[in-house]
Amino acid sequence: MQLENAFTMDTSSIKYGTGVTREIGFDLEEFGCRRVMVVTDPGLTKSQPVGVTMEALRERGIDAVLYDRVQIEPTDRSFREAIDFAREGRFDGYVAVGGGSSMDTCKAANLYATWPADFLTYVNPPIGMGRPVPGPLKPMIAVPTTAGTGSETTGVAIFDFLEMGAKTGIASRALRPLRGIIDPENTRTMPRMVAACTGLDQLTHALESLTALPYHRRPAADHPRLRPAYQGANPISDVWAARAVEMIARRLVRAVEHPEDDEARGEVLLAATYAGIGFGNAGVHLAHGMSYPVSGLVRGYVPEGYPPGRPLVPHGMAVSLNAPAVFRFTGPADPERHLACARLMGCDTTGARREEAGEILAQALVAIMRRVGMPNGLAAVGFGPEDVDRLVEGTLPQHRVTKLSPRPVGAEELKQLFLESMRLW
Ligand SMILES: [Fe+2]
């Protein structure tokens, strides 16, 4: 088997600064857009970030149409609804204001309105056909209002495929927004639990991209177009991910406990983008792969700070609940790297033995999770050992990420990892 010898570094243009959302009309004008679809979720319709965006667009004479029916943790059904709206609207540009759900929905709307096709055409195999996107999409600007998904820098859109109760997605460089507008003003009103979950999501993004299978150990692509966006750990993504780990570990607890601390919140928001650049090029692995069935199979758990009444394990929570067991498991694949991650999180690893590397990193993560109020493992969000087979079944099709695990995994290993994740402390 021939191994890969190339990697690329792709990212969106980023504009960072307090109040820069007000420049969005100018940005879209520059991209040549006259009629844009603004995508958000119903909880944000009357929010300041949406208000400022609409006003800034209209000020520049851009015809801005608001679509506010995004579902948090979107599904193929909610994607299709946005796609229909986009097709009918004949837009020449797109703006997403919100968290990952709004950004991902906006990417899908842009994709299928620009390159119409049956829904499963571009969806990741094995659920979809995974066909390459035929060409560029219309310009899209992402305005994140949570610090966590990093979706503003990636070409990935994730959704629940209802028929199978499984999370899957669409991944193509073509989906990447042209610009991300990172404005600390837009995250000021984030509920505490949302801040904690999204912050842990980005921390896990960075840790997973640092510990993913290195790009040169992946099989070579048959054609440059088939080289995946998730390429494995590589020297450029390492730089971004490492810095993200350091910034989040230092600032997350403060940003969660003191939402009025503009500096801490701004740094976490910026770190989310760094992590996005890192994992957008390297990929994530088992903690993400295992999180999809956790979110998909939720029964009764309703977290505070999220839409009331709807059972939900937020993405960042689902990811972090699995992560300690994952790093214990991946530690032996590259102990030095796991120790380096722990050091970036502020741990003193002097005298640490190589066999302890995974455990040390797991403990560093657990310490932060406890401080920001995460539940104590999968059991605390309603899962028990009787659910493990279904959780494993839901993880196995997530090839795109599980194959980036630095240690190969099968059903047996996953079973063990889920069992270990039931209780974290
Ligand atoms: Fe994530």
Image: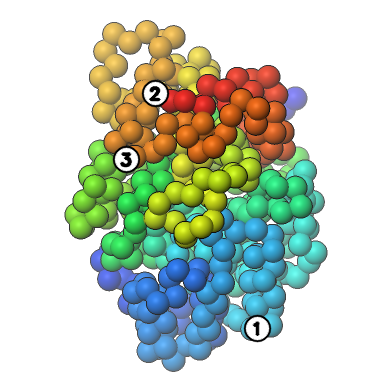
Taking the image as shown, residue 106 lies to the left or right of residue 425, namely right
Dot 2: within a 10 Å radius of its alpha carbon, few (fewer than 14), some, or many (20 or more) residues?
A: few
User: Which residue bears the numbered disc 3?
Assistant: 372
CA distance for labels 2 and 3: 14 Å
**Which residue, as the protein is rendered here, is positioned at the far bottom?**
61
Q: Is residue 14 visible?
A: no
Percent from the top left, x then y, of residue 248?
31, 41
First-in-chain label (2 vs 1): 1
Q: Nearer the viewer, residue 353 or 49?
A: 49
SS assignment at label 2: loop
User: Which residue bears the numbered disc 2?
Assistant: 425
Q: Which mark is residue 223?
A: none
Dot 3: within a 10 Å radius of its alpha carbon, few (fewer than 14), some, or many (20 or more) residues?
A: many
The residue type indicated by label 2 comes to Trp
SS assignment at label 1: loop
> Residue 190, relative to residue 201: is it above or below?
below
Q: Nearer the viewer, residue 240 or 323?
A: 323
Q: Residue at x 71, y 54 (%)?
A: 162
Q: Nearer the viewer, mark 3 or mark 1?
A: 3
Taking the image as shown, residue 394 lies to the left or right of residue 345, namely right
Taking the image as shown, residue 154 lies to the left or right of residue 306, namely right
User: Which residue bears the numbered disc 1?
Assistant: 90
